[in-house]
Amino acid sequence: MPTRRTFLQTTAATTFVAAAPAFVRGQNLNSKLQLAGIGCDGKGWSDINEMAGHDKTHHVAFCDIDLARTAKVHKLQPDAPIFQDYREMLEKLGDKIDGSTVSTPDHMHARITTDLMNMGKHVYCQKPLTHNVSEARQLRKLAKDSGVITRLGNQIHSHSHYRTAAKTIQDGAIGKVKEVRSWCAATGHGKSGYVDRPKSPIAPPETADWDLWVGVAPMRPYGDVKCYHPWGWRDWQDFGNGALGDFGCHIFDPVFTALNINNGPLSFSAGHTGMNDEIWPAQTHVKYTFPGTEYTTSKSIPISWDDGGSLPSTGGSHIPGDVRLPASGSILIGETGTMVIPHVGAMRLYTGKGTSDKEYPVLESLNHYHGWVDGCLSGKQPSDGFEYGGNLTEAVLLGNIAVRYKGEKLNWNEKEMKITNNEEANKWLSREYRDGWKLDS
Ligand SMILES: NC(=O)C1=CN([C@@H]2O[C@H](COP(=O)(O)OP(=O)(O)OC[C@H]3O[C@@H](n4cnc5c(N)ncnc54)[C@H](OP(=O)(O)O)[C@@H]3O)[C@@H](O)[C@H]2O)C=CC1
Ligand SMILES: O=C1CO[C@H](CO)[C@@H](O)[C@@H]1O
């Protein structure tokens, strides 16, 4: 753990001077990282509670658009003020806040995180990092320029299972990798109970500020309980990203780490079971081609994604025909063997002769949340910051653009951030922001 003097030095050198974190300006006499929590229930509560478990943190403010969902944070830190609008929180208490968790629905991640980073605050933001590709690109740049400590909220990245699987691939357990097939049991819609906007929308609860919840997205009536807020928003294109958006940043994560994929795909295409202009399809199948790396057999590698309950084929792998695949996970097919990485499960290795009985070292689990706190205190960026998390997010969101152009192969120029063979498809790289909510880069 650094002394107060060392983190004063490291952080002062790297963050924006205009609105440096509280401890930089010597206001934090207890030398604790002073945190805010934006989004207080659901995953927000879990993020806040995990951060509070670090002995060098102190929560100084909370924000949730629904005051009915703030009882837990109030109990955790009764003297910390609770706001409904994060902008008011930052205006009033910005000089006391060193960093914040951002655990709102996806459509608000980029705007809130941009505002925090522009004020020199460290950010732990839930997955996917953003709602569109252009936002992810912007956050990657801002994280780099501002020097704040960032981390994507895909906590399994630090789990023994994913760390061990990635290391074992890099140690050559299955040789170089030829192909990856990932999948997830969740469906792209079905959480809200709607496939179109409710015909007779009810009023929002009095405790919730609906205008703030909608935020950057076009205004629409509240709808129905759980239709959007909370939970159901995942189904809707304006707010969520379907099953690929919900689970892609978890399930692709050990694949990207193992294969050291730091670039976007070269091309992508998709099929699905049907969609309209409002919701994501129940089932999608996405095919990507990524540039090869030192861990792949060729200059490019196919990576596929299935969701909504359909499992990938095990054809061409070393997996015996009678093996049942886990509900969600990835298959990595290598030159000498195949690895199955269950979503939050221990890796399974298969050779042509059956299950491999060779032992590989098991890496310990690290605390993902505390890793971010330690990074904020030491000035050292942990793995899975916004550069890595932004690249992962871009891949997931590009898959969702392919979903909009069923059966069409889209070619991607990553550097120019452009789909090169379908001009119209580029409109989905960004969105129209509601008046007053445009991202301030
Ligand atoms: N890493 C993981 O394992 C998981 C990650 N997630 C991610 O966490 C995020 C939140 O998901 P989830 O918890 O299910 O969603 P919720 O809809 O439950 O939202 C979380 C909290 O944020 C509040 N909130 C919504 N909008 C705002 C806003 N603009 N400002 C402040 N607070 C706001 C919500 O209030 P209200 O109820 O009033 O909307 C709620 O208390 C998503 O990005 C999701 O992908 C989710 C689950 C697990
Ligand atoms: O990341 C996540 C993990 O699990 C949840 C469901 O159990 C998801 O919906 C969520 O967004």
Image (tube, rainbow, N blue to C red):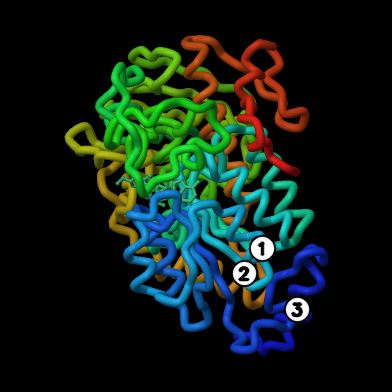
Q: Residue placed at 48% from the left, 72% from the top?
A: 80
Tell me which numbered mark, 3 or 1, is placed earlier along the sequence. 3
Q: Which mark is residue 121?
A: 1
Q: Residue placed at 58% from the left, 48% from the top?
A: 389
Task: Determine whether, in the image, residue 248 is placed left or right of residue 3.
Answer: left
- SS state under label 1: loop
Q: Which residue is tagged 2?
A: 97
Q: Amino acid at mark 3?
A: Arg
Q: Residue placed at 61% from the left, 53% from the top?
A: 87
Q: Which residue is tagged 3?
A: 25
Between marks 2 and 1, how big is the CA–CA gap? Answer: 7 Å
Q: Amino acid at mark 1?
A: Lys
Tell me which numbered mark, 3 or 2, is placed earlier along the sequence. 3
Q: Amino acid at mark 2?
A: Ile
Q: Nearer the viewer, residue 54 or 419?
A: 54
Q: Nearer the viewer, mark 2 or mark 1?
A: 2
Between marks 3 and 1, how big is the CA–CA gap? Answer: 13 Å
Q: Nearer the viewer, residue 345 or 48?
A: 48
Is the CB atom of the residue marked by disc 3 within 8 angstroms of ligand 1's nearest atom?
no
Q: Nearer the viewer, residue 412 or 359?
A: 412
- SS state under label 3: loop
Would you identify the image quadrant in which residue 247 lies?
Answer: top left
Q: Is residue 151 above or below residue 414?
A: below
Would you identify the image quadrant in which residue 265 lies?
Answer: top right
Q: Is residue 308 above or below residue 363?
A: above
Q: Position of residue 77 (x, y in %)?
A: 41, 75
Q: Are marks 2 and 1 in contact (CB under 8 Å)?
A: yes
Report the number of discs. Answer: 3
Q: Residues within 10 Å of mark 3 (few under 14, many from 20)?
A: some
Which residue is the extreme one toward the left? 322
